[in-house]
């Protein structure tokens, strides 16, 4: 009987599947990758040999104001390692630079001081100038033009007015932008809500190219890249991390070239062949990505790519913060008919997108394919309101899944980390 330990918050949950049911696991080789050098050494080496751009120390020369875009509390970016090295190199080139760390929250809630200290390290929080982006603070925002899709692009004024704009981040598969990292530090990272809503419209979310691991022809990515270029993002340091959240690869330099190198490394280690199964078990990779149901939609899309039509997905996500978005919650909880909700979304133009609509739209897409059993710490009524079935143990989840499938020996496949893989029907 295969025993598989699945990430759940900061812990692991034991999953035991009978041999007769077990179809296999879909695990990226990246999952267990170990770096051949120290984490700082990998980043220093990337910054010493930037791709498509001069060294950061050289870029910083003569620049009065420098803004560094840093990820927020919802992303497992190893900022404690990255930011000190970025700050050091900027000051090597320009000791007098006026540096601001701008936290790229996108449309998330503000990152608290405690969360900043945990993520960036207490020294940086005490010693550096830090501003948390607010997508609804119009005084912070300035228009930089019109996106390829037609929406107006509003970006944080600090970034636009900086003499030098750089970003740290990490690259992982992304369920509609193709990959995270690179240009996403700007859009949605420091964009106004109106701009994010336009970029995340129902038309684009439904686009066949707006899927995990796809950039070419992806309209969401095209908007994001345009925004990053127009905002003047001159330099990025992006990393790839393994299941232990340790850096296994780093790339620095131009927003396109460095990002391309990082995603090529990632793609070669995270594409897995789908194992079609009646029941597919997935996770959101544990903390910090499984703090709410909203974020867990990402891990659900990995299972969606493997589960058979009419099958069952068992999703493990601690979700101690509950739904994770008021609009997301009400879009599902207030209307029992998901088909009616989907029709409403698809009737809206690009400028009419509602907050969280994209996440709801993708969850509805998953729910149309399979029943979802949700293993979490979220309140049961919340899970049920989101059209999923709450459970609190693997035994309960597997028993319910078998009951729903109604087969004597349903096949069961496992995706230990649903946000780290690109599940493909091909090799």
Image: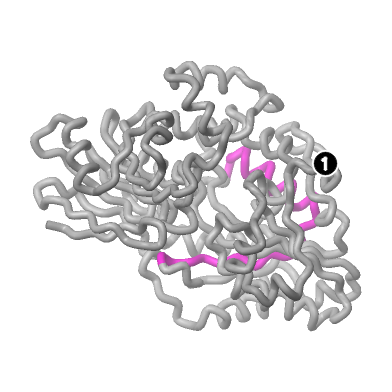
Left/right of residue 103 with respect to residue 262 in the rendered view: right
Residue 287, x across and y down, in percent = 45, 58
Q: Residue at left 83%, top 40%?
A: 145
SS at mark 1 in the image: helix
Left/right of residue 240 with respect to residue 68 in the rendered view: left
Residue 216, x across and y down, in percent = 57, 44
The colour scheme of the drawn protein is one colour
- Nearer to me, 314 or 381: 381
Q: How many marks?
A: 1
Q: Residue at left 40%, top 42%?
A: 300
Residue 248, x across and y down, in percent = 48, 72
Give residue 142's quadrant in the image: top right
Residue 285 falls inside the magenta stretch: no
- Nearer to me, 293 or 420: 293
- Nearer to me, 359 or 184: 359
The residue range painted magenta reads 216-243
Give residue 132's quadrant in the image: bottom right
Q: Residue at left 83%, top 56%?
A: 158
Residue 224 falls inside the magenta stretch: yes
Q: Mark 1 points at which residue?
A: 138
Q: Residue at left 51%, top 32%?
A: 329
Left/right of residue 71 with respect to residue 427 in the rendered view: right
| Residue 62 shows up from this direction | yes
Quadrant (top left/top right/bottom left/bottom right) for the N terminus: bottom left
Give residue 2's quadrant in the image: bottom left
- Nearer to me, 241 or 213: 241
Looking at the image, is 6 positioned above or below residue 426?
A: below
| Residue 212 shows up from this direction | no
Left/right of residue 43 with respect to residue 387 in the rendered view: right
């Amino acid at each position: 009987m295969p025993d598989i330990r699945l990430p759940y918050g900061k812990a692991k949950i034991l999953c035991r599947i009978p041999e007769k049911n077990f179809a296999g696991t879909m695990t990226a080789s990246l999952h267990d990758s170990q770096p051949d050098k120290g984490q700082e050494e990998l980043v220093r080496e990337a910054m010493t040999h930037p791709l498509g751009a001069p060294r950061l120390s050289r870029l910083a020369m003569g620049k009065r104001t420098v803004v560094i875009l840093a990820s927020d509390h919802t992303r497992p970016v190893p900022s404690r390692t990255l930011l000190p090295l970025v700050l050091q190199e900027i000051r090597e080139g320009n000791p007098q630079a006026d540096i601001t760390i701008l936290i790229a929250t996108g449309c998330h809630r503000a990152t608290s001081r405690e969360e900043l200290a945990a993520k960036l390290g207490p020294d940086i929080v005490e010693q550096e100038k830090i501003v948390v982006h607010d997508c609804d603070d119009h005084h912070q925002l300035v228009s930089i033009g019109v996106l390829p899709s037609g929406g107006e692009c509003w970006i944080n004024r600090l970034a636009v007015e900086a003499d030098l704009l750089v970003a740290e981040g990490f690259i992982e598969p992304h369920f509609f932008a193709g990959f995270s990292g690179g240009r996403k530090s700007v859009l949605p990272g420091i964009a106004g809500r109106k701009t994010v809503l336009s970029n995340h419209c129902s038309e684009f979310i439904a686009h066949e190219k707006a899927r995990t691991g796809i950039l070419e022809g992806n309209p969401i990515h095209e908007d994001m890249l345009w925004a990053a270029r127009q905002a003047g993002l001159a330099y990025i340091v992006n990393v790839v991390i393994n299941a232990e959240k340790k850096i296994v690869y780093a790339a620095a330099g131009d927003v396109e070239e460095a990002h391309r190198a990082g995603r090529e490394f990632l793609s070669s280690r995270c594409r897995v062949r789908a194992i079609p199964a009646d029941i597919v078990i997935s996770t959101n990779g544990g903390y910090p990505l499984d703090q709410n149901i909203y974020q867990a939609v990402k891990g659900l899309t990995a299972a969606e790519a493997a589960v058979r039509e009419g099958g069952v997905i068992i999703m493990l996500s601690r979700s101690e913060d509950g739904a994770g978005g008021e609009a997301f919650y009400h879009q599902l909880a207030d209307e029992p008919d998901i088909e009616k909700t989907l029709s409403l979304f698809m009737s809206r133009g690009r400028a009419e997108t509602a907050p969280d609509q994209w996440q709801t739209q993708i969850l509805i897409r998953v729910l149309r394919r399979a029943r979802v059993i949700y293993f979490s710490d979220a309140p049961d009524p919340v899970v049920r309101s989101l059209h999923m079935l709450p459970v609190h143990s693997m035994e309960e989840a597997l028993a319910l899944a078998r009951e729903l499938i109604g087969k004597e020996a349903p096949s069961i496949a496992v995706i230990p980390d649903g946000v780290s893989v690109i599940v493909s029907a091909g090799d």
